[in-house]
Amino acid sequence: MRAASEAVWVLPSDKSWAYSEAVAALQSDWPQAGRGKALVILNARELPTGAPPAAVVTLGATALRLVMERANAQPDWARVPVLGALLPRDGFAAVWKRPPAWVSAAYLDQPIERYLALIRRAMPRLTKVGVLVHEDDASQRQTLLKAAQAQGVRLVIGSVGAPDTLSGALRTVLAEADVLLMLPDGAVADVSALQHMLITAYRQRVPVVSYSPALVKAGAALGLYASPTQAGRQVVAMLKGAESASSGGSAWPASRLADGFTVAINEQVCRSLGLDVPDVSVLTDALRREEGMR
Amino acid sequence: MKLRLGGVRVRLWLATALPAMLVIGLLVVGFASQYGGRMAEALKDRGAASARQLGSAAEFSLFAGDRESLARLAEAALRSDVQLRGVILYDASGQVTAQAGRMSAPAPRLDGAIQIVQTKAFLVVAQPIYAATSVLQDDVYAPVPDVASRIRATESRLLGYAVVEMSLEALAQQRRDLLIWSLATAVGGLMLAGVMASVLADLVSVQIGRINHVVQRVGEGQLDERVDEANSGILRPLAKGINAMVARIATTQEELQQQITQATQELRDQKDAAELAARTDSLTGVASRRAFSEAAEAEMQRALRYRSELSLLMMDLDHFKVVNDTHGHVTGDAVLVSFAQTVQQLVRKVDLVARLGGEEFVVLLPNITAEQATALAERIREAVYHSHLLVEGKPLQFSVSIGVAQFDRRELSLTGWMARADAALYQAKAQGRNRVVLEMSEV
């Protein structure tokens, strides 16, 4: 084993399939970006106490939190570059409130434009897109409006405050919108509210576009997400630009939304709702072409 | 006639127990059929409810095509009811999406309508599942959204089917239990009815037996027999009636007996009076000729047996025809009465004075010799001659002629004896009347 300072540690939060898949992708892509540094896979809960590595890649929120705790506790860990992966943006923010420049992330979140582009491509006749935003989240609102303008769709935005305002906001949005876009935002709806949202939309016969394969299976018509493999590849791609872990944060990549994406379709739901959705590969190609042109 | 109490008892028992048996039997049959039918209906309702519930629970999962959640729903539905044997969820095209338990019945027809198939062993309910849309409750004042524009579905809204199979074994068992219970109740009821009917029949037949016994005894003439009314139970009115009847019969017989006795006594009195009249002369009160004849025969027998003396006075009033013609029959009768009284006063108690007819009288004198008789006759003649009967204020004198004859033991004939006395009397008449002649001839 080489010196720790020459190695990049990969810390999955646990042994679930998603992390394993991401690790596999990392390992397979590593030779083209590693610059001779070793890639060491370690259990996040059993961090070695010795010298810190050249850089750390965390997979999942738990691993990121453990590394943050180590950085706060051990001075020689304080400036170790960290790249968080396989977690959403608000998940990262919840762990590391004010990250320094050498701590960044490859978010799972897809850009809003991509969602809107998918909706436009998959359901061209449905032009009014409903979305729920937390009433305090002005930046998200701005992002949404900008993306809508760019994609040429109409937004129906519902403001959610306290948890008990969700139902009312949802009904208001569903009354007007042709399609409901569910975004990963813990402030808007926690996990337990998701099923409720799906069923409410179903009762109004409004198709749902969601951010995870689980939701597609549970009743959403479309899903747009980054697979673990895609997330793993994005990590390698981001680290390609980093010259050296020890040379400081100047070359350390900034946080980015998901580059790769996967489209999922619930054929049953689409059929039930009378939606004639193009094939997954057709949609994927179309979205890629569109993004390549930009 | 001997009453057959056994027959009465059987008939009474039948009369009491048969209606009870009929009623209980009808009740049992009616109850079993009605309740059994209701149980089957209830089971059918339960199956339909299970299918409906499963259908509404599976609606969204069918829409989402979520097979895992459909499998969970099917398992949960199967566990919720022990009588459910199998559960299948089909999608709208008739493909099985989830299955739990085992289905022994053939797959039902899936044609969009609810199907309920019942055979001996199972009940299958196929419940179609339709998508439901809800109207927004907040927008009660808003115009109702155009349904056609809201529903973008072009296909049928049918999402699939929930099919449940229920085992009817439990129902059959319940029916058997019900039947057994009903039969047990019926048998119990019948036994009770039988026992009660038997007791009642016994009671009545014993009473009838007692009454029958009394009636028989009365028929044999024991009119003092009575039925014990206090112990006659429900037949007390009958016992009372029979007692009253017997009492009435007894009273009537007693009255008859009394009337007969009275009539008999009256007849006897009349006979006695007639006999007395026959033995007494109605005018003078002395004995009649018949009484004299009897007494004379008796005295003759006695004189023969005891060798005692016996004499006879034959008396005839002198010129009585003249008295009658001169003074009338009333005076004649008064003369006769006066004469008789005079004679009666002079004779002993044992002597018998009798009127033979007209103005002819006779006196029978036991234990009196001819001489003594003659002396008595003389005293009579004298007393008569000196007695004065007042007729129209004037004394009327009359006399009597008397023939005396002593009983002769060789003679043995009253007629002959009297003829001898008559002959002596004739002599006295011939000798100038008002005199006494003793018959002295030899027989």
Image (spheres, coloured by chain):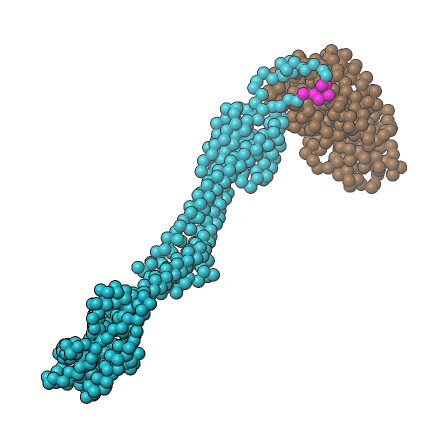
> How would you classify the magenta stretch by its main secondary structure?
loop
Image quadrant occupied by the N terminus of chain A: top right
Between B414 and A92, the residue placed more toward the observer is: B414
Q: Is residue A56 above or below residue B370?
A: above
Between B393 and B150, the residue placed more toward the observer is: B393
Q: Is residue A121 left or right of residue B283?
A: right
Indicate the quadrant where residue B216 lies: bottom left
Residue at x 39%, y 64% (from the top left corner): B225
- Residue A10 among magenta residues: no
Indicate the quadrant where residue B401 lies: bottom left
* Chain coloured cyan: B
Can residue B397 be seen? yes
Find residue A102 and report its horizontal and vertical position in percent. Answer: 85, 28
Q: Is residue A18 left or right of residue B283?
A: right
**Which residues are drawn in magenta?**
B135-140
Image quadrant occupied by the C terminus of chain A: top right
Residue at x 52%, y 30% (from the top left corner): B126
Which residue occupies the extreme left position in the image?
Answer: B443
User: In the figure, what tint was chain A given?
Assistant: brown
